[in-house]
Image (cartoon, rainbow, N blue to C red):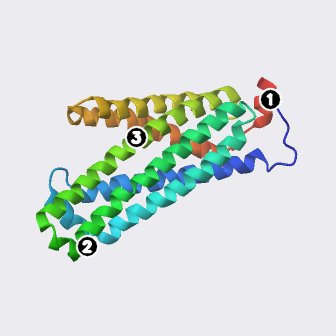
Amino acid sequence: MRDHPADTSPMVHARVAGVGYLIIIATGIFAEFFVRSSLIVPGDAAATAHAIMASESLFRAGIASELLMLTCDVVVALALYVIFERVSRSLALLAAFFRLAHAAIVGINLLNMYVPLLLLSDSGYLTVFDAAQLQALALLFLGAQSYGYVIGLVFFGVHCLVLGYLVFESRYVPRTLGVMLMCAAVGYLIDSFGRSLLPNYADYETVFLLVVFAPAFVAELSFSSWLLVKGVDVRRGVASA
């Protein structure tokens, strides 16, 4: 372990990570459950197209919220690295890399949200495709967006697994939070690989969502709230070590 007398206090980084994490949770829930779930009608391209164009501002707000989420992801990755490099620099760096990889994949994947807007709002495409074809293409890109998110969650799941281990070993915060993060990581990975491997994933989607969303929401909300309210006790971790 190394001392960092000239560095910013770990408590400051904990507060930054806590605020950033809470913003990530809020913007992610807004984009997924208040925007996409309300505007995208599975299997109905026409209804989805009409819903998006009728609530274009809401659809664009969902994209903007994800951009904010990804920006905070980068900040949180740095803050968590600074906090936990005292435990293991290599593992803290690994956790940061996986979180940044997730942010990069999800960021590129946002192109699949912009394309439907282009297809549905630019009349020039009607000279090549008819309205029904454009609506079908828009729904196709929205479907691709959901699978791109699955790819990103594999990297985020590994990040949570490594982060959970660091939290558990550090004793900077209650070790229970580390266990919860590792359980959330397992849920993310099970869901991501289940969606990739099971042709009939849709039959079990509700079960997978319960397995993933509930533990992950509780774990990440608890961890971020602790960082914001209580911060980290580095001296306790050093004493325990």
Does dot 1 land on a helix, a strand or a loop?
helix
Vertical position of residue 17 compared to residue 241: above or below: below
User: Upstream in the sequence, badge 3 or badge 2?
Assistant: 2
Q: Which residue is situated farthest in the right direction here?
A: 5
**Residue at image coords 55%, 57%:** 71
Front residue of this view, candidates 101 and 227: 101
Image coords of residue 131 (percent x, y): 13, 67
Q: Give the image quarter of residue 98.
A: top right
**Residue at image coords 31%, 62%:** 115
- Mark number, residue 238: 1
- Find the distance from the CA under tag 1 to the CA under tag 3: 37 Å
Mark 1 crowdedness (10 Å alpha carbons): few <14, some 14-19, many ≥20: some
Mark 3 crowdedness (10 Å alpha carbons): few <14, some 14-19, many ≥20: some
Would residue 103 be found to the left or right of residue 178 on screen?
left
Image coords of residue 80 (percent x, y): 65, 43
**Can see residue 174?**
no
- Find the distance from the CA under tag 3 to the CA under tag 2: 29 Å
- Mark number, residue 121: 2
Would residue 160 be found to the left or right of residue 166 on screen?
left
**Can see residue 188?**
yes
Q: Nearer the viewer, mark 1 or mark 2?
A: 2
**Residue at image coords 63%, 27%:** 168
Label 1–label 2 contact, CB within 8 A: no
Image coords of residue 119 (percent x, y): 25, 67
User: Upstream in the sequence, badge 1 or badge 2?
Assistant: 2
Front residue of this view, candidates 66 and 231: 66
Q: Amino acid at mark 1?
A: Val
Q: Amino acid at mark 3?
A: Ile
Q: Which residue is mark 3?
A: 151
